Image (spheres, rainbow, N blue to C red):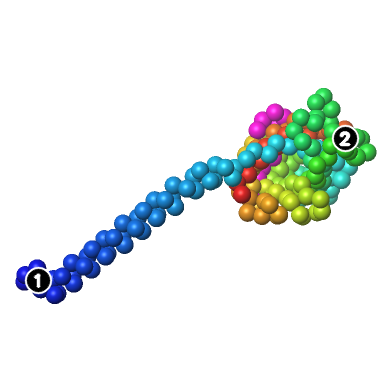
Amino acid sequence: MTLNDPKTAMAGARRLVTGLAFATLLGAAMASGAAPSGDAAKRTRPLELEIVENGTKFTPDPSLAFPDGLPAFGASFVTIGYVYPAGTIHGTDGVLPDGSPEFPDKVIGSWTCRGFHVGDGAHTATGPIVVTHQIIDLGPNPGDEAIMSDGYELADIGTQIHRAIVGGTGQYAKARGEQLQTLMAFPNNAGGVSLRVTLEVTK
């Protein structure tokens, strides 16, 4: 066949169009693949908080308990607390013995925690003591602006643990990332925990 053959010309044109289309798609894929890394970095921002439990509201399952009354392995519970900005608690617990906040004008949200005791239950001296689901509610109304996390909590004071951020509501509706949590004190004035939390949130 010669270059003037219509079939040859048509095949060449198809190869040219196919090549141009592939180059265009490759360029688009490279451009779309490069952008998310920078955007993702901008969407990730640490949110530093302090949480104090109102231990007077701690309610465990009484059917799974040691002879001393403390929750044993597998005992479920629910409890609540207050959320403060980082740096609020220095040499104090942030909660009064009756369970009310020590600094009511600095409370920026509420904390609800439910879960199960693991390890040696409430007798655990080190390592995971409970596995929990936490709701950190930062909105004006319950559920408006909340971040949820799942994971272990430690009996060790001053040791950081990583928890998974599994979602949220409002501006945090598609939140993912890690919650870095450190037990600051136990028991506090109301018999609960005091926590330092850093939320590395990607929205």
- Compared with residue 7, is residue 163 higher up or lower down, i.e. above or below? above
- The amino acid at mark 1 is Asn
Q: Residue at x 44, y 52 (%)?
A: 32
The one of 97 and 46 positioned closer to us in this rendering? 46
Q: Amino acid at mark 2?
A: Phe
Give the magenta part as a residue range.
Answer: 150-160
Q: Of all residues shown, which one is farthest toward the front?
A: 4
x, y (%) of residue 107? 83, 40
Within the magenta stretch, is there residue 80?
no
Q: Percent from the top left, x then y, of residue 131?
A: 69, 45
Question: Which SS class for mark 1?
Answer: loop
What number is the disc on residue 31? none
Q: Is residue 74 visible?
A: no
Of the pair 40 and 87, the residue shown nearer to us: 40
Packing grade of label 2 (10 A; few <14, some 14-19, many >=20) is: some
- Residue 134 vs residue 69: left or right? left
Is residue 155 one of those drawn in magenta? yes
Q: Which mark is residue 4?
A: 1
Label 1 to label 2: alpha-carbon separation? 89 Å
Closer to the chain start, of discs 1 and 2, is 1
Question: What residue would you read off at disc 2?
Answer: 103
Q: Is residue 146 visible?
A: yes
In the image, 8 versus 140, the foreground residue is 8
